[in-house]
Image: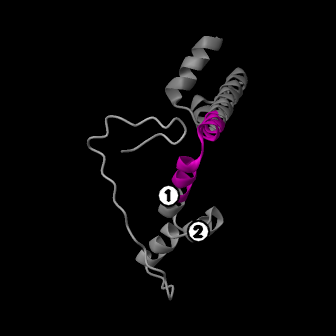
Amino acid sequence: MIKNADTNETLKGLDDLEIYFMELPKRESVENTRLQKWMALLSSNTWEEMKRNAEGDDIMRQVYEQAKEIAMNESQRIEVLNRKLYLIGENSIKQYEREQGKIEMAKELLKYGIDVEIIARSANQSIDEIEKLKKMIN
């Protein structure tokens, strides 16, 4: 029977749940094999140790990050999610502003009669986009 630790409520709908236990023996000598690295990561005693064991390997770093997220309480998880969403929003705004800056630059260059192909390359836009822009400002 599995219960929610906070509410002591028995969790339902777990008919397909399977739990596996893996005993990791103590390591006498640390070899540089991938298996040894995974064993070191999974048998870490602290978050700092786990982070050190995950260094230099993207997949192990992702496992470390996921484990930290799973270990958080609900309010910490929401805080991390909100931070990720904020950063996504910030990046979107910056990308939009860069794009708007390119469009404004292209408009200025069109006013001075600069060749459409040169503007397209400079603004990293297609020639068709610059032609449309040219029609809009004329």
Query: Residue 46 sits in which quadrant?
Result: bottom right
Image mark for residue 45: 2
Q: Is the image coloured rainbow, by chain, by secondary structure, or in one colour?
A: one colour
Nearer the observer: mark 1 or 2; the answer is: 2
Can residue 123 be seen here? The reply is no
Q: Which residues are magenta?
A: 63-85
- Residue 74 in magenta? yes
Q: Residue at x 34, y 54 (%)?
A: 19
Residue type (three-letter) at the residue carrying disc 1: Val
State the residue position of label 1. Answer: 63
Give how far across and how far down residue 21 sits, in percent: 37, 63
Does 82 sit left or right of 21 as displayed? Answer: right
Give how far across and how far down residue 28 sits, in percent: 50, 88
Residue type (three-letter) at the residue carrying disc 2: Asn
Does 127 sit left or right of 105 as displayed? Answer: left
Query: Local crowd at mark 1 within 10 Å, few (<14), some, or many (≥20)?
Result: some
Query: Residue 136 sits in which quadrant?
Result: top right
Local secondary structure at mark 1: helix
Local secondary structure at mark 2: loop
Q: Earlier in the sequence, mark 1 or mark 2?
A: 2
Q: Residue at x 43, y 74 (%)?
A: 24
Of the 4 image quadrants, the one containing the C terminus is top right
Q: Is residue 138 above or below residue 119?
A: above
